[in-house]
Amino acid sequence: MIRKQFKEIYSLYEIIYKKEELKHQSVEDIVADLKQMIIDHPVIAYIDIFDQYQQTQRVNGVINPAIKAAQNIIFCFGMELPTPEVLAVRPRSIGVCELEDSYVINFMEAPNAQANATMVEMIKSLKSTD
């Protein structure tokens, strides 16, 4: 997993898995596995799944032809509410994008190191153990 800057402002964590590296066969399968991890976690609250590909098609937007599917799973750690500003960085989401021979999985860095570590751990657990 790498940490990178997007548009020189946003700090992201991202990993690209070859399709054969994962135990899943689709974006939907990957998101379903992440959803179960979130539901099973004692602190994280599951919110919803957003199909970015479908939404972009719906509004006749532009989709890179290399992208075959793209969804976000939305959730919140929300263990504390110290200031109103924390609302600006919640909830969290993990994006899952299918390309021809790979999946790109990423999320924007959270202001909480433990939240970032948990998301990295969840994403790394998607890799096949075969």
Image: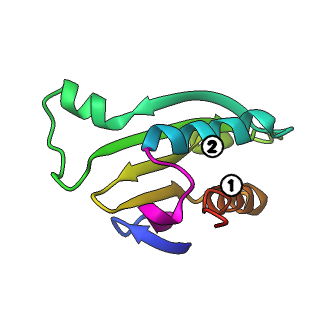
Element type at mark 1: helix
- Residue at the (67%, 30%) spot, across then down: 46
Dot 2 or dot 1: first in sequence order is 2
Which quadrant is home to the C terminus? bottom right
- Residue at the (80%, 42%) spot, across then down: 82
The reply to whether the C-beta atoms of the residues labelled 2 and 1 are less than 8 Å apart is yes
Furthest toward the front, the residue is 130
Furthest toward the right, the residue is 42
Q: Nearer the viewer, residue 55 or 126?
A: 126
Q: Which residue is mark 1?
A: 122
Q: Nearer the viewer, residue 55 or 30?
A: 30
- Residue at the (62%, 27%) spot, across then down: 47
Q: Nearer the viewer, residue 95 or 111?
A: 95
In the rendered structure, which amino acid carries the disc numbered 2?
Leu
In the rendered structure, which amino acid carries the disc numbered 1?
Met
**Residue 125 is at least partly visible in this image:** yes
Q: Which residue is mark 2?
A: 34
Side of 104 where 81 appears, left or right: right
> Magenta region: which residues?
10-26
Q: How many residues crowd mark 1 within 10 Å: few (<14), some (14–19), many (20+)?
A: some
Give the image quarter of residue 69: top left
Q: How many residues crowd mark 2 within 10 Å: few (<14), some (14–19), many (20+)?
A: many
Q: Determine if the magenta segment contains residue 106.
A: no
